Image (cartoon, helix red, strand yellow):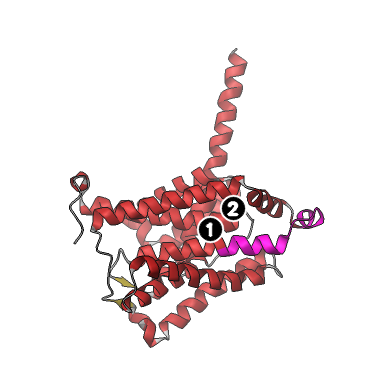
C-alpha cells in the first residue's frame, strides 16, 4: 500500500480527477502538436494511437506486467502503428493524409469492437491498477505531462525542430535545400504517436473500464481542437487550450452532450477567424498595446 502523503488533504477526490484529466489532455495535445504543429501533418485520428496504447497496457497488466513496463509496451505499440501510418504520409499530403488518419480511427474502433479478446463492445475492465493512490497518481501524471512539455520545447528548439518547421512551411523547398523530408515526417509521427500511447496507458489506469468509443472520432476532433485553438505549433497556447477545453464539458452539461458539435464549430470558427489560435490573438493584442503605447509617447 502507498504511504500517506501529508499533502493529500489539499485536494478532494473530484479535484484530483480534474487535474489528472487535464494533465492527460495536455499530454495528448502536445503529442499531436508535434505532428501537426511542428511538422504540418494533419491527423484526424490521433485518438486511435491513444487507444492502442491504452489497450496494449491493459492487456499487459492483465498478464502481470508492472504498470511502468506496460506503459512502455503501449508506447511501443502506438509507435509501431504510427510508423506504419507515417509511411503513408510520405506519399500523400494534407487533405489525403487527414482522410487516411481518419480511416485509422474508424478501423481501430471496428477491430476492437469485433474482437472478443479486447472485450468487443463491452470493453475491458477488472484489470490491475497501480498501487499509488489517487494523489500520487496525480503527481505522476502531472510529472509526465511536464516531461512531455520539456521534450516538446527541446525538439522545437533543436535542429530537428528547424527541419520540422521547414517541412511545415514548404515541403518542396525543404527537400531542395537537402532536408530529409521523408525521414523527419516519419520521426514526427513516431514520436507523437508514442507519446499518445503513453497518454492512453495513463488514461486507462485512472479509470475502471476502457471501450473503443473512448478513442473514437469525437475524441480525435477534441484533441485537434486543443491544438488549433491553442495555436498550431504554440506550446503554451496548446497547453492552455487543452486545460480549458478539458474542464469546459465538466462544468457545462450542454457542451458534454454535444461535444462533436461544439468542437467542430470551434474548429471552424478558429480556422476562419483566427488560424493562429489564442496564441495568435495574444500576439496581436500585445502588438496593439505596444503600438498604442508608442503613439501616446
Instruction: Label 2, secondary structure: give it.
Output: helix
Disc number for residue 292: none
What residue is rendered at 35% in x and 73% in y? 58
CB within 8 Å, label 1 to label 2: yes
Against 237, residue 68 (above or below) is below
Q: Residues within 10 Å of mark 2 (few under 14, many from 20)?
A: many
In which quadrant is the C terminus drawn? top right
What residue is rendered at 21% in x and 54% in y? 13
Q: Position of residue 48 (x, y in %)?
A: 48, 70
As rendered, which of 48 and 195 lies closer to the eye?
Answer: 195
- Determine if the magenta segment contains residue 179: yes
Q: Position of residue 132 (x, y in %)?
A: 25, 59
Could you tell whether 101 is left or right of 138 in the image?
right
Q: Mark 2 — residue?
A: 37
Region rendered in magenta:
172-190
Disc number for residue 32: 1
Q: Is residue 249 visible?
A: no
Amino acid at each position: 500500500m502507498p504511504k500517506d502523503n501529508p499533502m493529500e488533504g489539499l485536494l478532494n477526490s473530484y479535484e484530483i480527477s480534474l487535474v489528472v484529466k487535464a494533465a492527460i489532455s495536455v499530454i495528448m495535445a502536445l503529442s499531436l502538436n508535434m505532428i501537426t504543429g511542428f511538422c504540418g501533418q494533419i491527423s484526424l485520428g490521433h485518438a486511435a494511437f491513444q487507444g492502442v496504447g491504452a489497450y496494449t497496457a491493459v492487456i499487459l497488466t492483465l498478464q502481470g506486467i508492472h504498470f511502468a513496463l506496460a506503459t512502455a509496451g503501449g508506447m511501443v505499440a502506438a509507435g509501431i502503428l504510427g510508423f506504419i501510418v507515417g509511411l503513408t504520409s510520405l506519399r500523400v499530403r494534407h487533405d489525403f493524409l487527414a482522410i487516411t488518419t481518419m480511416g485509422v480511427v474508424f478501423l481501430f474502433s471496428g477491430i476492437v469492437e469485433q474482437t472478443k479478446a479486447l472485450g468487443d463492445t463491452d470493453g475491458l475492465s477488472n484489470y490491475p491498477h497501480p498501487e499509488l493512490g489517487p494523489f500520487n497518481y496525480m503527481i505522476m501524471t502531472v510529472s509526465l505531462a511536464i516531461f512531455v512539455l520539456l521534450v516538446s520545447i527541446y525538439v522545437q528548439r533543436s535542429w530537428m525542430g528547424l527541419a520540422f518547421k521547414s517541412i511545415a512551411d514548404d515541403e518542396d523547398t525543404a527537400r531542395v535545400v537537402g532536408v530529409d523530408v521523408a525521414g523527419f515526417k516519419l520521426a514526427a509521427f513516431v514520436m507523437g504517436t508514442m507519446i499518445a500511447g503513453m497518454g492512453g496507458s495513463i488514461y486507462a489506469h485512472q479509470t475502471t473500464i476502457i471501450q473503443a468509443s473512448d478513442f473514437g472520432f469525437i475524441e480525435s476532433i477534441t484533441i485537434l481542437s486543443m491544438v488549433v485553438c491553442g495555436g498550431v505549433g504554440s506550446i503554451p497556447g496548446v497547453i492552455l487550450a487543452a486545460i480549458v477545453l478539458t474542464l469546459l464539458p465538466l462544468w457545462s452539461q450542454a457542451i458534454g452532450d454535444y461535444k462533436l458539435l461544439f468542437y467542430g464549430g470551434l474548429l471552424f470558427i478558429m480556422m476562419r477567424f483566427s488560424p493562429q489560435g489564442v496564441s495568435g490573438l495574444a500576439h496581436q493584442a500585445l502588438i496593439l498595446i505596444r503600438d498604442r503605447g508608442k503613439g501616446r509617447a
